[in-house]
Image (spheres, grey):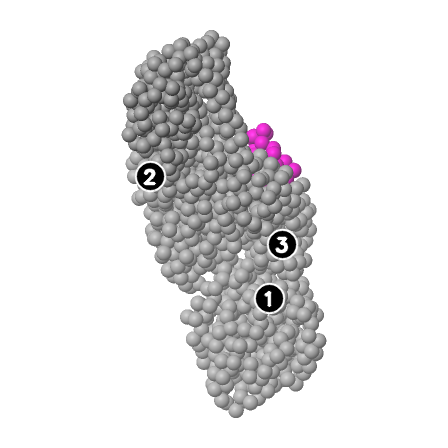
Amino acid sequence: MPDTHALVNEFVLMLKRRKVEGSQATAKQTAELLRSVISQQRVPHTNQAGALIDAINSVGEKLIAANPVELAVGNVVRRVLHIIREEDLSLATTAIGNVGLSAGSDDEDNVEQDDYPRLSAAAVAAASRSTLRAPSLHTLLEGIPDPAAAHRTSSSGGDSEGKSKSADKSLRTRKLKHDVIEAVNELIQDIDTCHELIAEQAVEHIHHNEVILTLGRSRTVMEFLCAAKEKKRSFRVFVAEGAPRYQGHILAKELVARGLQTTVITDSAVFAMISRVNMVIVGAHAIMANGGVIAPVGLNMVALAAQRHAVPFVVVAGSHKLCPLYPHNPEVLLNDLRSPSELLDFGEFSDCMDFGSGNGSPLLHVVNPAFDYVPPKLVTLFITDTGGHNPSYMYRLIADYYSADDFVVQRKSSAEQ
Amino acid sequence: METRRTTSRMVIDPKIRQVGFFTSNEYQIPANRTHSFPVESNSPPISNISPSNNSLSPVMIPPPRHVSDNITFKFPMSPLRRLSSGDNVLHGSYNPSELFLSSGAGLSSESNKVGDGRKGKGGGKVASSLPSGGFEMGAVKSSNLTTVSVMKMPPGVSEKAGGGLIEVRNEHTQSSKPLKEKTSKAERRALQEAQRAAKVASRAEGSKTGVVSGGAALGNPKPAKSVKLPLPKKDGSQVAASVAASEKKGSDRPAEKDRKKDVPHPRLQFDDKNRVEKAKKRAVVKQTEARNRVELFRHLPQYEQGTQLPDLEAKYFQLDPVHPSVHKVGIRYLVGDISGGNARCIAMLHAFKDAIRDYSTPSEKVLTRDLTAKISSYISFLNECRPLAISMGNTIKFLKSRIGRLPLTMSESEAKATLYSDIDCFINEKIITADKVIVEHAVTKISDGDVLLTYGSSAVVEMLLLYAHKLGKQFCVVVVDSRPKLEGQALLRRLLANGLDCTYTHINAISYIMHEVTRVFLGASSVLSNGTVYSRVGTASVAMVANAFSVPVLICCETYKFHERVQLDSICCNELGDPDAISNVPGREDIKHLNNWTSNENLQILNLLYDATPSDYVSMIISDHGMLPPTSVPVIVREYRREQLWL
């Protein structure tokens, strides 16, 4: 796959240079890149899924290393891995199901599964998912094979590659790759349309004469507000400008263009204004498994102010921002420090900022972090494309999208290689 | 007080009345140039004294906040006065007033008329007599009452003449209350406006008020009063009441009176169209209302930046009522040249010093009264340039009380010298020394290895940091800044120049940096008596985040900035800055999304200048009276006010 190498390297460079702005764009580009990696990947006859997973893992490791702070990359990589696993599993089960149907229950593994020969791929995938996690009410209600069966599938799922060997190879050679690419296409589409899905819920959350506060600019928030506006809700929006990027100005301009009553305030005035605000709606950079939010800088302050005045703090985010990791010291480890030039004029303070010279001049540090960590207790509600959720529910929602094997992309790939 | 005034008027020459800011102590009372007698609770002494001059008894007119104030005052009724009141009746000022009443014009119109009437008749005294400073409310009320009492006094007086003064008094005090309640706030305000206008006019006309001989004065003032009667229904009883109240004058005033006075007078609310219109007419500074106002802040003034300046500059060389130094300071306020509570306050005081130096009492005027009026006009000018800080309000109160307390016997040069030293003393003691004391206190809270965070640029905090550095303490400073003023950069520059280790960041990153911080030192524009800290916008956020991270928040604030007002949020009372400062980001040419924001009426830009930090975020307030919890602020306010008055 020489040609994908070039693509991957190019994207890695872009990530390293922080040329890709916004987690949605990043997610989409990552997914597209991975799709091309998959399609270019030559698949051996045996252990197809293993080969694909290996390939994705190695690429994913590079991408994640390129910008470890942009969690969307890792999220998409994990989701693609998850897709591969599920597709593989569903193929395996259907194949086994076929075998079971035709040859009777010669395989002990499939004894129970005979009763569900025509299970959809999704259902099977769900079953397999349940094997990777604790059993969920969801799977129970769907009438998936009882625990024993699930357990067996799990054992078989654990070494699904090995099992696939024994299954009908010719049938599945092309099918797996094709299915995976289909599924990745769906993922890309999901990423594209998550705004609309989120915006559809706007009317349920915004009422007439509401006063809404937001900080900085998030496309999701913009569409959310505009959707409510289109539904003839009239409300006013306070936009904190979001120093030092001042994207609030852009948001204000966009909102005004759509006819919304908009007031731009400074970030420092958030506390003063929040007592007159009914709801805070903000975008996020990433949502962690514990319900914490990695958000544009300044939002922790806003969240604290909202909590003080009992104003609901609502985070809108597409599902590609759900990250299966639990944060540890996120303020430092999941943060980017941006250029001081955004805050200070280099010319004036350059003599003080020279760390290397050691000429006795006092040291000046300029701290310009890009992100804030908002702990889950400050968040009232998450609105994702699958609906509204409590912070405490996020871990469960996340489990739907990722398989536990993939939580650590790097280590696994290195171990396998 | 109103009653008192009325009585005095009726009885005595209007000139005699002492005008101005009333402080609870008796010193102020001696209004007469010629005689300064402290008015005692006992009416007899005064009456005794005053008779000598027939009609010249010093009457103190304190601006009462409340109706009930009246009750507390006793007006010394001397037989002579009664007589004079009788005179009033004779003059027949009565009728005209009634005419007015019958005409029943709307409130505002009434008030206008009143003003006019005064002007015309040189009743300027009345107007001028109003405490010219910030105490208009009381004054207004008083005027109403006065008029009333004037009208009806005669009968009541005559009845009383028998000598049952005391009884009458009691009855009337009771009755007086309802009367006052009748005047709605709006009415009073309107009146007050009118009076102010009248005051200005009267000042111009000037001299009549001054040293008119008793007889002449009697003649003149009465008509004016009669004109005033704005309130149609006042029964004899009420009148009597007012009289009675006035009788009580000197005696038991202090305690209750003080308390009443504590209630801060309402500020001009800029969503009140009528009043704003009137205010505009008086304004020296012509300003254009900004467009795209934020609905929530209609009650605050906001003008288009730059529209006032050329006009003001042009006026600099004109001979107008504003002293050049004051004018200069005003312009510098406007431009933002002087900012920071202490700097503004000191600049103002220096300007007033200049003004006092160049001041000479016009003939036929009393220095205390005329100077107070002058200062008030300066203050309203400065207020137009930029709304005065709360701390400046305290300063002005101080200055006015000082002027008001000058003995009438004092020569002009002496008086000026006294005021001079008073002002210098205030600057030294309340600002400069206070800062030093605060620094001494606060430096004990800095220990080696501390990481101190400060927000914006506070003069005291800067002094503190430099001092601690001089003492050789090892610490580093986090300077947090915010748009649009970026005052922190200036502070940063000065700290770096003095060799301190600094970290600079913006307010959004506050939760990032707060992990490392061990103490937060903040300045304040004012500390209100519910413990709320009124300060540069963003202070509340910093304090909140510090509180969330369990970092102690220490507020450094001089005691003269303590104020008895209370405030719950940052919206009711605030100041609006120039919105364009927000739409333009200096040094970032790429950000120009809001360049012509005024073109779209849906878009507003709000540039708040202050916010109110709830007291529970504040660990400690370090003032020149020591280190105290926010709950102790009202105590200090109380003690401090007393001290200031007696100073």
- As measured in the structure, the alpha-carbon distance from the residue carrying label 2 to the one carrying label 1 is 51 Å
Marked residue chain, label 3: B
Q: Mark 2 near mark 3, Cβ–Cβ under 8 Å?
A: no
Between residues B504 and B311, which one lies in front from this camera angle? B504
Q: Residue at x 42, y 31 (%)?
A: A322
Q: Which callout, 2 or 3, points at the residue further toward the start of the chain?
A: 3
Q: Pointer 3: residues within 10 angstroms few (<14), some, or many (20+)?
A: many
Q: Is residue A152 visible?
A: yes
The residue tagged 1 is B186
Q: Is residue B537 left or right of residue B593?
A: left
Magenta stretch: dominant SS?
loop
- Local SS, label 3: loop
Magenta-drawn segment: B579-598
The subunit letter for the residue under badge 2 reads B
Of tags 2 and 3, the one toward the viewer is 2
Residue B85, percent from left and from top:
59, 83
Amino acid at the residue labelled 1:
Ala
Position of residue A211 measured from the top left corner of the image (x, y, whole percent): 53, 47
Disc 3 marks which residue?
A: B322
Would residue B582 be found to the left or right of residue B565 on screen?
right
